[in-house]
Image (cartoon, rainbow, N blue to C red):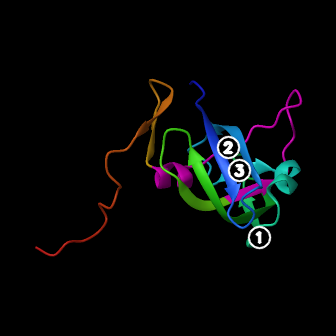
């Protein structure tokens, strides 16, 4: 299995000068854009900051802080306004590995091409669960 890394611009809507361009690992098993707590101060104070518990891939429960709204642009895709999750991360070789989760991928219209190891644009938003009257 290959790795897909995407470039993302993240900006605090309340403090537009608090922005950062990052590279994040595409992780369809993660819900949120997940960033290290060590970067939280770089984004200033968000309008909403809420402590949450989350479950990791190893089924451990840990604490994090969901912050927003944030202006987010995954390179090559439309701008969205959503939230980011800050968690404790341990750097590997001095580098953190932020995650790009499925909520932002769906919102910005990106699909994962597992064969080509890249993100592709989705032609249409997925609203198939809407019931239409005949």
Q: Which residues are magenta?
A: 84-108
96 vs 85, left or right, is: right
Could you tell me residue 15's position as x and y percent?
A: 75, 63
> Disc 3 marks which residue?
34
21 vs 89, left or right, is: left
Residue at 67% across, 50% down: 10
Mark 2 vs 3: CB contact within 8 A: yes
Q: Number of marks in the image?
A: 3
Could you tell me residue 40's position as x and y percent?
A: 83, 55
Q: Residue furthest front?
A: 17
Quarter placement of the C terminus: bottom left
For the residues labelled 2 and 3, the Cα–Cα distance comes to 5 Å
> Disc 1 marks which residue?
49
Which of 75/122 is in front?
75
Q: Residue furthest bottom?
A: 133
Q: Secondary structure at mark 1?
A: strand
Q: Would you identify the image quadrant in which residue 115 lies? A: top left
Q: Secondary structure at mark 3?
A: strand
Specify whether residue 31 is in view.
no
> Disc 2 marks which residue?
99
């Amino acid at each position: 299995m290959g790795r897909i890394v995407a470039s993302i611009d993240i900006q605090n809507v309340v403090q537009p000068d608090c922005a950062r361009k990052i590279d994040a690992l595409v992780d369809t098993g993660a819900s949120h854009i997940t960033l290290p707590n060590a970067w939280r101060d770089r984004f200033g104070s968000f309008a909403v900051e809420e402590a949450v518990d989350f479950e990791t891939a190893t089924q451990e429960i840990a604490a994090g802080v969901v912050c927003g709204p944030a202006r987010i642009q995954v390179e090559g895709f439309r701008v969205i306004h959503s939230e980011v999750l800050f968690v404790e991360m341990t750097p590997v070789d001095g580098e953190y590995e932020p995650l790009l989760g499925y909520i932002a991928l769906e919102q910005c219209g990106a699909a994962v091409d597992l064969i080509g190891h890249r993100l592709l644009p989705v032609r249409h938003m997925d609203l198939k669960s809407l019931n239409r009257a005949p």
